[in-house]
Image: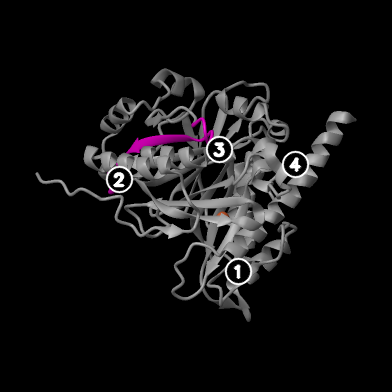
Amino acid sequence: MHRKMTESLIFPRQGDKQNSDFFEEYLVRLLEERDHSGLTDIIHEIEAIMITVDPGHSIRYIGELSLMTPYHYLVTLESEDHWTHILRVDMNSPDFLVREVKDPSIQGVFRSLNEIYPIGMRKPNSRYMGEILRVDNLHEVVEKQKEREFRFFSQDQIRRMQLPGNLAISKPSPYTHNIVSYMERPLDQIRTYALGVSAIRDDVQEVYLAAKSMQKELGINDLIMPIDHLATRIYSQNREVAILEWLSLSSYYYWGSYDITDQNSSTNVTKSVHCPNEMQSPAKVFTANNTPYFVNHLEKLPSPTETFVRNYGPRLHHIALAVADGERNGMENIDYVVKQIASQGRDFLLDVIGSKDDGLKQIFSSASEHSSLIIEYVQRFGDFNGFFTKHNVAELTHAAGVEEELLEMQAESEITH
Ligand SMILES: [Fe+2]
């Protein structure tokens, strides 16, 4: 049978950030080889994202997500040391796996990734772990990726970590500290995770239902859409390798990079070759400082991105959700959503920025006390299909940096007192 070959290099390049010759050469070589090997065609969309939280935090985190996102609580998988809650919008968008460690003293690789960073260590079990990608043939993908020198946890290690047994899971990236997992599933089958004993927990269901009825009462339940993008922050010197590594592990393409000169950083965007609509497979964004921290004293430039990475380690910084285009009660939807959520005591780091004329408006919430992740809302107007405006990104980056300085001061005073 003749198999169609997806071409990953035909997409127009966006952005103004210059890349090195190394990057441009290996972008072409890696994606050509990925296409020819068949990997591009058998690796599909992001099937789920995985987050771990500290003991006692998952139920409140699910309450937060149920209010601030379109996700629904589905079921909890209980294993010896963990609860893994499954949240879903529908089968056209990725699931959310929220995993809570039962015992605060438990050790493990994900905890180790937090422990050497001054703010990351304060919530040792809380971090974004990575994505699960849907594949046609798990064995074929893993064998090919091993030939390309990617490393995977063994089945025994997966069992001991109490992660779903039907996944193949890569070792954490040295650049992003995220894992990439693969799960085989034909499109006409429901997603299942082979882990523990499944039950709908009354205490989780109660918090979920209360949040959903509040979402309805606030009139925002039909305005918040699935995930638009996932933004990972990395050290400045890892910008290009982190992008190329992710492209090698996925079937995403390089959309382009923008220099955010004001904040001495860049925003680098990759998207799925198979799903032009981000709702089906979110864009993956990488943010890196333009210069490493140790030249700051010479350059005197702001460095919020590098500071974040030094404080938390490389990791996911925010999850962006799309807001439906339109108006409610005389306000643009995003303003309405933010006003209603803020009325429930949730803080935002700044006002909604951007405008209808710019094509999009955006805002960052404060970081979740449960996951340390920020929620971004983004509303695009009319037929605007750009990803962001430089001005917005500069303001968002700045605002997140200011909040972090406060956390840093708190962390220091905890150590000295
Ligand atoms: Fe973003």
Which-is-in-front pick, marks 3 and 4?
4
Residue type pointed to by label 2: Gln
Magenta stretch in the rendered image: 173-188
Mark 3 vs mark 2: which is more N-terminal?
2
Q: Earlier in the sequence, mark 1 or mark 4?
A: 4
**Percent of width and height locating residue 310:** 67, 36
Exactly how many numbered labels are in the figure?
A: 4
Reading the image, the residue beneath label 1 is 334
Crowding around mark 3 (Cα neighbors within 10 Å: few <14, some 14 to 19, many 20+) is some
Contact (CB < 8 A) between labels 1 and 4?
no
> Residue 237 shows which numbered tag?
3
Quadrant of the rendered structure where residue 191 is? top left
Q: Which residue is mark 2?
A: 189
Query: For the residue marked with disc 4, what is the amino acid?
Result: His
Query: Which amino acid type is shown beneath numbered disc 3?
Result: Gln
Q: Label 4: which residue?
A: 297
Q: Secondary structure at mark 4?
A: helix
Reply above or below: 238 against 322.
Answer: above
Q: Which of labels 4 and 2 is toward the front?
A: 4
Q: Give 45 or 416, whichever is nearer the viewer.
A: 416
Main secondary structure along the magenta-highlighted residues: loop
Q: Earlier in the sequence, mark 1 or mark 2?
A: 2
Give neighbour class at mark 2: few <14, some 14-19, many 20+ (Cα, 10 Å).
few
For the residues marked 1 and 2, what is the alpha-carbon distance in whole angstroms? 35 Å
Q: Looking at the picture, which amino acid does disc 1 mark?
A: Ile
**CA separation in Å, label 3 and label 2:** 42 Å
Instruction: State how far apart marks 3 and 1 are (Cα).
Output: 35 Å
**Disc 2 beta carbon < 8 A from ligand 1?**
no
Return the disc, 4 or 2, that comes first in the chain's sequence. Answer: 2
Of residues 329 and 376, the one nearer the viewer is 376
| Residue lying furthest bottom | 330
